[in-house]
Image (cartoon, rainbow, N blue to C red):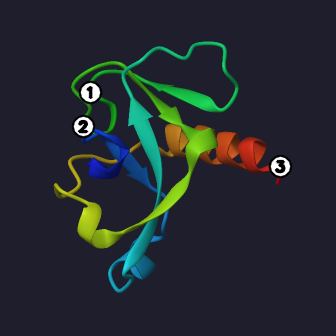
Amino acid sequence: MLPHQGKSRPAIILTADWLSQYARDVTVIPVTSIAHMNFPTRVELQAGEGGLQTRSWAKCDQVTTIPVSLLRNPAFGRLDAAKKKLTEEAVRLALGL
């Protein structure tokens, strides 16, 4: 959960698992439940995906790095390989890579 955006929200951790074990900071994609259909850098996530309780969108155009200390809850789910690939592609699009 990301508390620094005015309210706690779920996030997708982009930092590699092996690195995030030792890092003081992690790179994340914020997740919102506000609909962003037809926006190419927002990836739709269904309720239940990655442990989410409601239909949500990964805000791949708002990738940010935060201190690990700001993560409030332990990870409550993982994305499947197909959804992970979609988020990675959306991040590349947002960053012009």
Residue at which label 1 appears? 48
In the picture provided, is 40 more to the left or to the right than 67? Answer: right
Badge 3 amino acid? Gly
Q: Nearer the viewer, mark 3 or mark 2?
A: 3
Question: How far apart, in angstroms, are the residues tagged by discs 3 and 2?
Answer: 29 Å
Residue 96, label in figure: 3
Residue at which label 2 appears? 51
Q: Quadrant of the C terminus?
A: bottom right
Question: How far apart, in angstroms, are the residues tagged by discs 1 and 3?
Answer: 30 Å
Badge 1 amino acid? Gly
Point 27% across, 20% down: residue: 54
Residue 6 in percent (x, y) is at: 31, 40
In the picture provided, is 86 more to the left or to the right than 69? Answer: right
Badge 2 amino acid? Gly
Residue 48 in percent (x, y) is at: 26, 27
- Secondary structure at badge 1 equals loop
Q: Nearer the viewer, residue 79 or 35?
A: 35
**Which quadrant of the structure image shows residue 25?**
bottom left
Mark 3: give few (<14), some (14-19) or many (20+) Cα within 10 Å. few
Q: Nearer the viewer, mark 1 or mark 3?
A: 3
Q: Decide which of tag 1 and tag 3 comes sooner along the chain.
A: 1
Q: Nearer the viewer, residue 81 or 41?
A: 41
Question: How far apart, in angstroms, are the residues tagged by discs 2 and 1?
Answer: 5 Å
Marks 2 and 1: CB-CB under 8 Å?
Answer: yes
Mark 1: give few (<14), some (14-19) or many (20+) Cα within 10 Å. few
Point 77% across, 42% down: residue: 93
Point 59% across, 29% down: residue: 42
Q: Decide which of tag 3 and tag 2 comes sooner along the chain.
A: 2
